[in-house]
Image (cartoon, coloured by chain):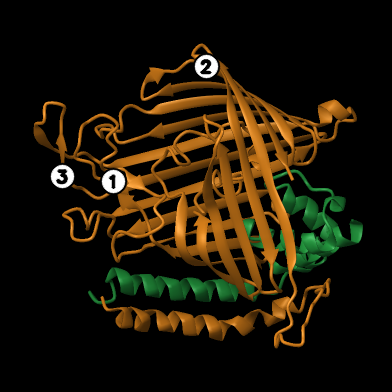
Amino acid sequence: MKNILKPKTLTILISIVFITTVAVLSSCKTPALIAAKPGAQLWAENCTRCHNTPPPSIYSDAQWDAVGEHMRYKANLTDQEVTKVVAFLKSAN
Amino acid sequence: MQPLTKLKRILPAIGLLLLLSPITKAQDSTTTVAEPLQTVQTPNSPNPGSESFLFTGEGSSMFIASKDGNTFVPLTLMLMPLARINDRLFLESGLKMEMQDDGSFAFGLEALNLHYRINSWLTVHAGKFAAPWGNVLDMFGEGFVSRFPIGPIGLSDDGMAPTDLVGFGAQGGFQAGTAKMLYDVYLANGPQLIVNEDGLSDNMTGHMSYESLSDNNKNKAIGGKIGILPFSNSALQIDAFGQYTGQTGDVGSKYQDVSSSSYGADFNFYKTFNITMIRLMGQYEETKTGNATYTVTDATGATSDYTFNNKGNSWYLAGTIRPTGSSNDFVHDLELGARYAQYDPPKNALWGGDPSKQVTLDLTYWFTWSSQVNFGYNIQTDAGTKLNNEFIIRTLYKF
């Protein structure tokens, strides 16, 4: 029992439980209400979490790709959110 | 512990990661909009690649008026080249330039962080990055989203919690029912214990240095953040974060085993009522450093032992209001904010004392979605001593 409670063993155990939990939760089916959200709605909801919504015309398509990827990491956007928001911004710029 | 033994211990976790990656395929398939990448392939390149590049950043200047005098604070320029190298690799970088009194610029590398996306919910990254440590440094770290001309006391470089990290980590965000969850975990060089035996004035002994790029021992800091956005419209985000380092002192020194643990929580909420958008945000963080007895030398040259309960905390609460639905263009672009911040350092530390308190009021006018002028009023006590109130004007342009 003492061995299991060593800090490093405990860290690894917690990591495994954490990763498994994330994997299971992320594999759950997305509710239809969420999956049906258009890019424009996700753009408004997610940008406003931190800042004003940027107008689509300020960047080119390639630049929006870079911005979308940056927000994936900066704001922890989900894969679907990044894809839909970037597609909307490209279509509207 | 030998490196090989360490490796053996983390191998199961790595294996599990790889095994679980395909689980997300089902979720990926629900994506309804897919944009083709612009690819460029040369005859000598076996792997097709593409690159989307954005050179962005912001510049700001500030004017501060108080009974102590009036001064323009020199220009600060933040350059942020971002490169989406292909659909999995992304490089973010940040270079900060601050004008000095003699007109020269001081440069600082704020970030140089390479991300590799493994699947829809897992990205690994390595380099220098800002600690995912509360919304002051993380969500509201860039000037154009901070909404106040100056930061809250005790929650950035002037505080006791992690700011900059060099190491690697894993992060992601995913849908969990109607809620969204996010995580960000890392292994980094960690903080270094400051030990200075010379003099009592400006002596930071017992404080941590979070800005060192190299490590002073073999121990590493482990930390991270988990967050939840419980509402389907992402209006509320709540995060909890922590970091632990078993050793912070120089290797071989009697302070090597002094540990440091930090933890905290934050929230951010926005909602539009009729024509007005209201935002509430806050953060609490606490740091405890292991017990140690330090030796200090006073002005007469006499040495003495020095120890204290090395525990401190910082927190802030803020709110802003903006009439986003107003038909008047000028009123529409105004945002009013108020913030209270408090920093409680260890009372008996050479660098500690009574709590510092700060009230900051702000009126922002938005020229564009990201460029602004802030009119701020700052009321502050520093370790129980009232400072002169300050009137602050900041202009900030994002490009």
| Residue at horizontal 84 percent and vertical 26 percent from the top | B330
Which of the 4 quarters of the picture holds residue B2? Answer: bottom left
Disc 2 target residue:
B389
Identify the image quadrant of the N terminus of chain A: bottom left
Q: Which chain is green?
A: A
Q: Does B115 appear above or below B247?
A: below
Residue B291 screen position, x and y as percent: 21, 48
Q: The orange chain is which one?
A: B
Label 3: few (<14), some (14–19) or many (≥20) C-alpha neighbours in 10 Å? few
Q: Does B10 appear above or below B133?
A: below
Q: Distance between the residues labelled 3 and 2?
A: 38 Å
Q: How far apart are marks 3 and 1 (CA)?
A: 13 Å
Task: For mark 1, name the chain.
Answer: B
Disc 1 target residue:
B194
Disc 3 target residue:
B293
Q: Determine the secondary structure under disc 1.
A: loop
Label 2: few (<14), some (14–19) or many (≥20) C-alpha neighbours in 10 Å? some
| Residue at horizontal 32 percent and vertical 71 percent from the top | A8
